[in-house]
Image: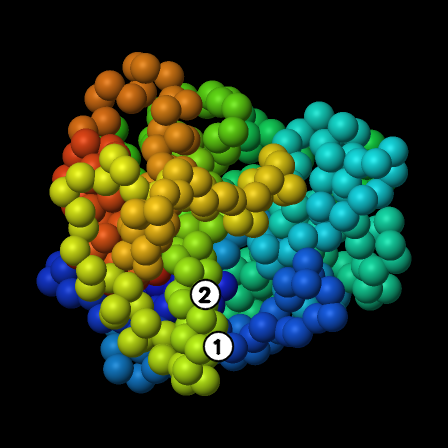
C-alpha cells in the first residue's frame, strides 16, 4: 500500500508517494506560482486556489500511477491564513508567514503584534495567523462573507475531502497564536479580550485523524511543515539536533515535556511531545540575497547576467578555508527577528586583506550557521548534553557544501544528510504510517 504526502511550501509544492514495505519514495516538485504582487512591500499574499489546483494535479498524477493509495497526508507553510465562506470556498488570498502587517504601527507607538501580545499575554509576531486577523479586523479587511479562517494546508485537506468547514490539528493551531500548548486548545478567553470572535477558528482535531475522503482514499488532518520535516528526517529524536534550511532556517530539538524558553518556540509534535524551535527569517534567503547582489554587480559593470543556477554553482564551488579566524563576520538578520522586526544584519571585521567575494560567501554561510547555533545555546544543559547527532535537511544544506562545512565546524558534529529529497512531504507520509 502506498501513501501520498504533499508539502505546500512558499516557493514550491512537493509531493511524494511512499511504500512502507519496500521503502521506495518517488517525489515530484512543482513551482508555487501563486504569488500576488502588492504595492506594499510588507504584504505577502498568494492565491489559495492556484495552490489547490497544483495540489490536485499532484494527487491525480500519483493516483493514475498507483492504484493502492492508503491515505493522503498534507503539510505546508505554517502561520499563514486564508478566509473561507460557509461553502468552504476561499474568499481571500493566503496571507503567508512572511506577511509584515503585524509590524506596522498601531497605537501608543506599538505595532499590531505587540499590541495583541499585551492584550492576550501570548507571544505574537507578524505572520502569525491571529496577528494577521487582528490587523484585518482593525482595518476593516476581513471579508464580509468570511465564516472561518485556516492554514493553507487545512484548506487543502478540506477541498480534497469535500468538506465545507476546515479542521486543524494542534501543530497547525499553535502556529496561529493564542494557543494553550499544554492543553492543546485555543485560549478563547484571551482571544475574546482582543475582540476576536472565536467561532471563526477551525475545530481542533487530533493529529493524523481522518478528516474525510478523496474518492474513498482517507485524507488526514494536516500537520505543520516544521514537525513534518522533523518526522521525515530524524530517526533518533532523543539525541538529534535537526536543522533545516529553506527560505528560512530552523533548528529543532525534541523534548518529552512542555517547557518555555525565551526566543525559542515550543511546538506540539504529532505523536506526542514537543519541538523547541529556533527559527531565523533569513536562512537560505540570506544566501539568495548574496546571489542577487553578485548578479546586480555583474549587470552594473558588464550589462550581462548569469542564471541563478550558474551563480549558485560558482558560489558553492569555492574551497572552504582551513582557517577562518581572520574572515569577515556576517550577521544574517537581514529581515529582523520575530521578536525584533527592526533588527538588521551587518558585515563587520572588514580589513584591507579580507574584503573579497570568496570571504563574503564564507561569511554568509558562517553567519547562517552562527544564528542557528545561538538558538542551540539557549537550551538547558540537560537537553544539550545528550544531543550527539546533527541531522540536516532542506535544499539550503543539501545543495550548499559550504553551509554543510560551516554547520559541522560550529556544532562540532558531522552533518548527517537526510536521504529523502522532500523531507516534509515524506514526514506527512510517516505521520500516517505511524498511526496505522
Kindly identify the residue that appears in the image at 28 percent across and 64 percent down.
315
Is 362 or 277 nearer to us in this picture?
A: 362
Q: In the image shown, does 434 or 171 lie closer to the viewer?
A: 171
Residue tagged by mark 2? 293
Check disc 2 and report its element: helix, strand or loop: helix
- Residue 80 placement (x, y as % from top left): 60, 55
Between the C-alphas of marks 2 and 1, the distance is 10 Å
Upstream in the sequence, badge 2 or badge 1? Answer: 2
Q: Dot 2: few (<14), some (14–19), or many (≥20) neighbours within 10 Å?
A: few
Q: Residues within 10 Å of mark 1 (few under 14, many from 20)?
A: few
Q: Which residue is mark 1?
A: 300
In contact (CB < 8 Å): disc 2 and disc 1: no
Query: In x, y percent, where is residue 297?
Result: 44, 71
Query: Is 279 situated above or below 158?
Result: above
Kindly identify which numbered label has been placed on residue 346. none
Instruction: Answer with left or right where residue 322 lies relative to residue 157.
Output: left
* Residue occupying image coordinates x 36% and y 29%: 376
Q: Is residue 357 left or right of residue 39?
A: left
Q: Residue at x 49, y 22 (%)?
A: 261
Q: How is the image coloured?
A: rainbow
Task: Say how many tags the image has.
Answer: 2
Q: Is residue 22 in view?
A: yes
Amino acid at each position: 500500500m502506498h501513501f501520498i504526502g504533499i508539502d505546500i511550501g512558499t516557493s514550491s509544492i512537493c509531493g511524494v508517494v511512499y511504500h512502507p514495505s519496500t521503502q521506495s519514495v518517488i517525489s515530484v516538485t512543482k513551482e508555487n506560482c501563486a504569488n500576488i504582487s502588492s504595492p506594499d512591500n510588507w504584504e505577502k499574499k498568494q492565491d489559495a486556489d492556484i495552490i489547490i489546483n497544483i495540489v490536485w494535479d499532484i494527487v491525480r498524477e500519483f493516483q493514475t500511477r498507483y492504484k493502492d493509495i492508503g491515505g493522503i497526508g498534507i503539510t505546508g507553510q505554517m502561520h499563514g491564513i486564508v478566509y473561507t465562506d460557509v461553502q468552504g470556498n476561499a474568499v481571500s488570498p493566503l496571507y503567508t508567514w512572511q506577511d509584515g502587517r503585524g509590524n506596522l504601527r498601531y497605537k501608543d507607538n506599538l505595532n499590531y503584534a505587540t499590541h495583541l501580545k499585551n492584550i492576550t499575554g501570548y507571544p505574537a509576531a507578524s505572520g502569525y495567523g491571529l496577528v494577521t486577523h487582528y490587523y484585518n479586523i482593525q482595518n476593516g479587511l476581513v471579508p464580509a462573507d468570511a465564516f472561518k479562517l485556516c492554514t493553507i494546508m487545512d484548506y487543502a485537506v478540506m477541498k480534497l475531502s469535500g468538506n465545507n468547514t476546515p479542521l486543524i490539528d494542534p501543530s497547525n493551531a499553535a502556529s496561529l497564536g493564542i494557543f494553550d500548548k499544554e492543553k492543546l486548545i485555543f485560549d478563547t478567553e484571551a482571544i475574546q479580550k482582543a475582540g476576536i470572535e472565536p467561532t471563526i477558528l477551525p475545530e481542533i482535531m487530533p493529529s493524523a485523524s481522518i478528516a474525510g475522503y478523496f474518492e474513498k482514499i482517507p485524507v488526514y488532518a494536516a500537520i505543520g511543515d516544521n514537525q513534518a520535516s522533523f518526522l521525515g528526517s530524524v530517526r533518533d529524536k532523543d539525541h538529534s539536533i535537526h536543522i533545516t534550511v529553506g527560505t528560512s532556517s530552523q533548528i529543532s530539538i525534541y523534548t518529552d515535556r512542555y517547557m518555555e524558553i525565551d526566543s525559542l518556540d515550543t511546538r506540539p509534535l504529532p505523536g506526542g511531545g514537543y519541538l523547541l524551535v529556533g527559527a531565523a527569517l533569513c536562512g537560505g534567503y540570506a544566501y539568495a540575497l548574496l546571489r542577487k547582489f553578485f548578479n546586480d554587480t555583474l549587470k552594473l559593470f558588464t550589462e550581462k547576467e548569469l542564471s541563478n543556477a550558474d551563480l549558485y554553482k560558482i558560489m558553492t564551488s569555492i574551497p572552504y578555508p582551513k582557517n577562518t579566524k581572520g574572515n569577515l563576520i556576517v550577521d544574517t538578520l537581514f529581515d529582523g527577528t520575530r521578536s525584533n522586526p527592526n533588527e538588521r544584519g551587518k558585515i563587520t571585521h572588514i580589513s584591507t586583506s579580507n574584503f573579497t567575494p570568496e570571504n563574503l560567501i564564507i561569511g554568509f554561510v558562517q553567519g547562517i550557521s552562527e544564528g542557528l547555533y545561538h538558538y542551540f545555546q539557549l537550551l538547558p544543559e540537560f537537553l544539550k548534553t545528550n544531543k550527539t547527532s546533527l541531522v540536516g535537511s532542506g535544499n539550503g544544506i543539501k545543495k550548499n557544501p559550504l553551509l554543510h562545512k560551516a554547520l559541522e565546524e560550529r556544532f562540532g558534529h558531522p552533518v548527517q544528510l537526510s536521504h529523502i529529497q522532500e523531507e516534509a512531504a515524506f514526514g506527512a507520509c510517516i505521520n500516517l504510517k505511524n498511526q496505522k
